[in-house]
Image (cartoon, helix red, strand yellow):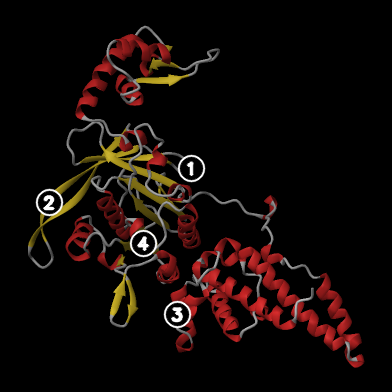
Amino acid sequence: MTTSPSDANDIAVRLGRNVLGALLLNPERWREACSLTVDDFLPSDHKKIFAVIKRLNEQNCQADMGSVLAELGNTFSASSLGDLMDGVLTPNLPHYVRCLRKASKDRRLTHLFERALNLDERQTVLPQIKAELEAPLDTEANQLIVIRGDKAAEKPLRWMWKPYLPIGKLVHFGGNSSQAKSPVTVDLAARISIGANWPDDTPNMIGSRSVILLNVEDDLEDTILPRYRLAGGDKTKLYYVKGTRATADSERGVILAEDMHKLTNLAQSFPDLGLIVIDPITNYLGSSKMNAEEQIRALLTPLASLASKLGIVVITVGHFNRREKGTDPLHRIMGAAAFTGVARAVYTFGPDPDEENKYCHVMTVARGCGGEGSALRYRTELVQDHCPDSFSTEIIRVVWTGKSEATAEDSVDPASFRDKAQEDEAAKLLRELLREGKRPAKDCAELLKAEGYDLDKLNASRVRRKAGAESKRFSGDRFNSWYLRSSL
């Protein structure tokens, strides 16, 4: 059964609607539709909308609904664009694109065949018909991008703070809300703004840079700025993103899915930008579900691309989930796996295992980038300080106190005072067991358990560390042995 021209046009209109709706719902999927042209769409309204989407993407701006509407001006309403997204199944976007291209090709062929009926045009039109019939639907824009090894130049991994903050990468900070992650980000921002030494006292080799900060949980005037000033920060280098102007008289919070192009434009406007902090990232997800892998990856990938393009560091901050003890630290980061999968480096923040003071913390490496650094200790202090306007106030200050042997496991599963006491006792016994030489790890665990110290309940790595012991498979053995570091 042959499809009538009117039916074919109706199908083309529906396909165009589906493509535009899918792109407005998921602007980050532009690559899947970039092979289309304005002429592939049939209604003039569809042509105008697609032209705006294409232009925004060519300008490296995310074509979300708000941006497209602003570009279209008064000729379109939000409801008319919203109608395009009703009932659209976004996973089918590649299918819609292919079908729309085929419908457009069929229209061109129909027009050419009609012209070929005219004898005067036949000789001109026949080669065009042949070329159209032979042209593949999938253009180079939809093909794999392949670079041969010898055509690419190698480049070194660059560091803002070696080996903690890699330039051009996305970094994630994870930890419970009581571990002073936000004061740490403000401290780092202050150091970057003036080119000060890093917390481990290594020199800052990049000089002073501007910083963009997104943090709606802490007030700018009474919390962020005093902390930043006390840390020595240059206020002229700090750019705090309060929100997004919805209308002339109203504001709303920043939503990454809708405002990524605005953040990109802001970042590109500062030639000396060094850092963007988004704290916590969950406040900027909008309607995106924090556990939805595809949605979160779609939000984080543009951030990683922005870091790479501008040669800056982007830090996202998140929290821990409530999974049981012993879970891999990377799996203790709340939300989708993309939070740690897209980030190049991941750091966890927890109580300092070697201190009883609740204001003593440790920053540990869950996944490093090109060489793992040591865990770093820090504490927070409440300082009475006079602000520039002469009034006195209390400000939280971060004081870095050196390296630590703590691990990411220590920060995600901190020990209670009772556990620490048992670990100290077990470590003392383990040292005695290993004084005469290495022992199989299984034997050590069984001997400790017989004395009342169950390593299935205590943290075995902390017990070994406190004992000054290591675990290793020696040559010729089929099992790991524990031994004192001082014995080798």
The answer for how far apart the CA atoms under marks 4 and 1 are is 29 Å
The answer for how far apart the CA atoms under marks 3 and 1 are is 49 Å
Q: Which residue is mark 1?
A: 370
The answer for how far apart the CA atoms under marks 4 and 2 are is 31 Å
Amino acid carrying label 4: it is Tyr
- Rendered location of residue 171, percent (x, y): 41, 51
Q: Residue furthest front?
A: 1
Left/right placement of residue 1 relative to residue 241 reads right
- Tell me the quarter of the image containing the N terminus: bottom right
Q: Residue at x 18, y 33 (%)?
A: 356
Q: Earlier in the sequence, mark 4 or mark 1?
A: 4
Q: Which residue is mark 2?
A: 383
420 in relation to 156, above or below:
above
Tell me, for residue 168, which label it has, or none: none
Assess whether mark 1 and mark 3 are in contact (beta carbons under 8 angstroms): no
Q: Tag 3, which secondary structure?
A: helix
Q: Earlier in the sequence, mark 4 or mark 2?
A: 4
10 Å crowding of disc 4: few (<14), some (14-19), many (20+):
many
Tell me, for residue 79, which label it has, or none: 3
Amino acid carrying label 3: it is Ser
Amino acid carrying label 1: it is Gly
Task: Kindly report which numbered mark, 3 or 4, lies closer to the viewer in this rendering.
Answer: 3
Q: Which residue is mark 4?
A: 284
Q: Tag 4, which secondary structure?
A: helix
The answer for how far apart the CA atoms under marks 3 and 4 are is 24 Å
Amino acid carrying label 2: it is Val
Q: Tag 1, which secondary structure?
A: loop
